[in-house]
Amino acid sequence: MSKPRYYFNEGNTKADLDFTNLGFDYFPCPYRFEAIYEYGVWRARGLVENNQLELPEGSQCVHYGQQLFEGMKANTGKDGNVYAFRPYENAKRMAEGARYLQGAAVPEELFVLGIEEAIAANLPFVPPYGSGAAMYMRPFWMGIDDNIGVKPARKYLYRVFVCPVGPYFKGGFGKDVGQQFMVGAYDRAAPLGTGHIKAGGNYASSFKPGCEAKAAGFAEALYLDPTNRRYIEEIGAANFLGFKGDTLITPDSHTVLPSITRDSLMFLAHKMFDWPTECRKIPLEELAELDAAACCGTAAVITWIKRIVDGTQEWTFEFDERWQKLYDTLIGIQNGDLEDPFHWRHEIPT
Ligand code: PLP
Ligand code: COI
């Protein structure tokens, strides 16, 4: 039997952190998982303690943005088990990104092994049931050759670090905390570019519109489609949702990141609540006809929208109880309070 990694006094099993007051911030948990691809095979290096990376200075990830990341959460259930949410969907999305960036995809089993190992090794830092916090997982992938030419790497690094986190937007979810967004003057992704994969470069492009929105007092930028600048794309690092009458609508676009949270919410709306759903083009001016608006993602969960501003135009919305219903159901499935009819929970072996 292997020896435990952590030893506690007085029967305590958690790190001495104030889990109820966490923001969405980096925290250096003791262990991270690492694997390397070279000579055509992936090899799990296992857990490492050093949170610094040593890379060849010519690495493709450094110069040419050959890099991907994922964002996922795990929750402690009432039963004390730790559950990740649909990790194979993130594995597939990262593999799709690697194929697009012409690199070696992380096999799904290795991707999931990485998150399992990183969570299990940092168990005292996983927020307890009822704290309102979650363990955020950040798997990432990068091309790391000794290189100077503009070409894909032959060698790749896969790493997973984890951080206990609280709400992404100030105030978290609640009737009284609707957020305000500003339509950005710049695009985050090109029409036939990398918007649909989780490449770091998309986020570099979002800094200018995002910082401008924040400087003007908004929570984030709303992106329009890069071809016509007419249709709603997404908001910061979250997808857009709206209710038009009974129907839950979301933009259909090749240039938005296919959100796993959005997929889950649309599925719940359709299969569990029998609400009509539509994935289609949503012109910005259609905001005037919506009854409610929100954005969603792993970090944002569901965040309802109070106001959207585009120059001199603006649209305002009220809180809608249907957001609460979606939120409660999603969180309930994630942390084990509710049945898991679609087999979305993945128990972490600890
Ligand atoms: N859109 C962007 C640009 C994102 O960065 C994210 C976060 O991952 C999302 C949407 C939401 O995706 P998911 O629900 O899979 O976290
Ligand atoms: C997530 O929602 O997990 C994300 O990856 C957003 C992140 C860029 C903060």
Image: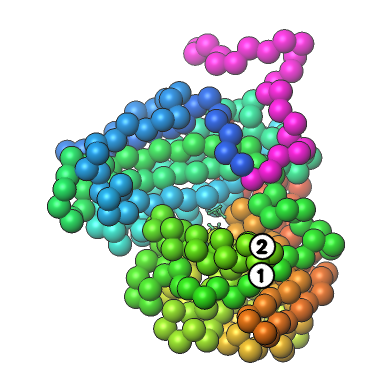
Identified by mark 1, the residue type is Phe
Question: Is residue 223 placed above or below 212 in the rendered structure?
Answer: below
* Left or right of 52, for residue 185: right
* Residue 342 visible to an observer of this rendering: no
Q: Which mark is residue 219?
A: 2
Residue drawn 42% across the image and 70% down it:
189
| Residue 128 % position (x, y) | 73, 34
> Is residue 11 magenta-colored?
yes
Q: Quadrant of ligand 2?
A: bottom right
Q: Is any atom of residue 189 visible in this view?
A: yes
Q: Main secondary structure of the magenta part?
A: loop
Give the magenta range. 1-24
Whichever of callouts 1 and 2 sits on the residue coming sooner in the sequence is 1
Q: Residue visible at 68% across and 85% down?
A: 313
Give whichever of 197, 236 is nearer the camera.
236
> Residue 147 location, x and y as percent?
17, 45
Inspect the magenta stretch and tell me whether residue 199 lies in it: no
Nearer-the-camera pick, 155 or 191:
191
- Residue contact between numbered discs 1 and 2, judged by CB atoms under 8 Å: yes
Between 152 and 249, the residue placed more toward the observer is 152
Q: Is residue 316 above or below residue 3?
A: below
Identify the amino acid type marked 2.
Answer: Ala
Quick check: is the Cβ at mark 1 less than 8 Å away from ligand 1? no
* Res. 181 mark: 1
Q: Is mark 2 within 8 Å of ligand 2?
A: no
Give the residue drawn at x 54%, y 37%.
162
> In this rendering, would 316 be left or right of 208?
right
Q: Residues within 10 Å of mark 2 (few under 14, many from 20)?
A: some
Q: Element type at marker 2? A: loop
In what element is the residue under mark 1?
Answer: strand
